[in-house]
């Protein structure tokens, strides 16, 4: 009976790890007080003093505008009304963070021969990628207390088209976790 041997080269290992990273989905976490009556919130606006922003998206005006556009549309699709002239029920604030991640993988392949003993190869592959997080806060306009916080995290590429798609996907997913949905 012949033994089937599979040899992993560093290139194949790198391709496999890139494929696994590319297939990762977005992770969402939320925090809020379940006793909060979210049905009392119907109108929203951007948090005052947004020009004092210090987040990463502020460094790129196009990303900042894309985030604001996606968030506004997302909340409006859920039945909330954007209010820029009157006092809203709640404010929206967001921040963006990106950090480089080093992903490593080790593959060991050993075989045993009666006269030679154990021998084989060990391959190590390393890959850098960027992990981005969008943090979204909803703040009660009356009490100025945070009523909801959502965070979405995922792998971010460098292609502008891909970044726009990721922003849309991340915002849509994150807003779907907001506790209230109104019918228009």
Image: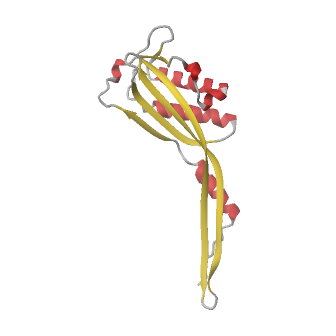
State the residue at coordinates (46%, 28%): 137
- For the view shown, which residue lies furthest in the bottom direction? 115
User: Residue 105, how many percent across, how many down?
Assistant: 60, 61
Tell me the quadrant of the picture where the N terminus can be found.
bottom right
Decide if residue 25 is on the left or right side of residue 156.
Answer: left
State the residue at coordinates (31%, 23%): 37
Which quarter of the figure has residue 2? bottom right
State the residue at coordinates (59%, 19%): 51
Tell me the quadrant of the picture where the C terminus can be found.
top left
For this rendering, which residue is in front, 4 or 90?
90
Decide if residue 106 is on the left or right side of residue 151.
Answer: right
User: Residue 75, how many percent across, how many down?
Assistant: 48, 23
For this rendering, which residue is in front, 126 or 183?
126
User: Residue 10, how many percent across, how many down?
Assistant: 69, 64
Residue 164 position (above or below residue 104):
above
Which quarter of the figure has residue 36? top left
- For the view shown, which residue lies furthest in the left direction? 35
Residue 3 is at least partly visible in this image: no
Residue 87 is at least partly visible in this image: yes
């Amino acid at each position: 009976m012949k033994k089937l041997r599979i040899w992993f080269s560093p290139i194949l290992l790198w391709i496999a790890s890139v494929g696994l990273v590319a297939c990762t989905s977005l992770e969402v976490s939320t925090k809020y007080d379940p006793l909060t009556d979210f049905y009392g919130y119907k109108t929203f606006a951007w948090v005052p003093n947004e020009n004092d922003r210090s987040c990463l998206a502020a460094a790129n005006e196009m990303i900042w505008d894309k985030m604001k556009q996606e968030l506004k549309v997302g909340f409006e699709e859920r039945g909330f009304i954007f209010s820029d002239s009157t006092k809203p029920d709640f404010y929206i604030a967001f921040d963006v963070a990106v950090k480089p991640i080093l992903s490593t993988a080790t593959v060991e392949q050993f075989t045993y021969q009666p006269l030679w003993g154990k021998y084989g190869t060990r391959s190590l592959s390393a890959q850098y990628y960027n992990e981005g997080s969008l943090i979204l806060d909803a703040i009660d306009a009356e009490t100025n207390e945070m009523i909801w916080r959502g965070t979405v995290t995922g792998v971010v590429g460098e292609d502008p088209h891909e970044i726009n798609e990721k922003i849309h996907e991340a915002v849509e997913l994150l807003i779907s976790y907001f506790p209230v949905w109104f019918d228009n």
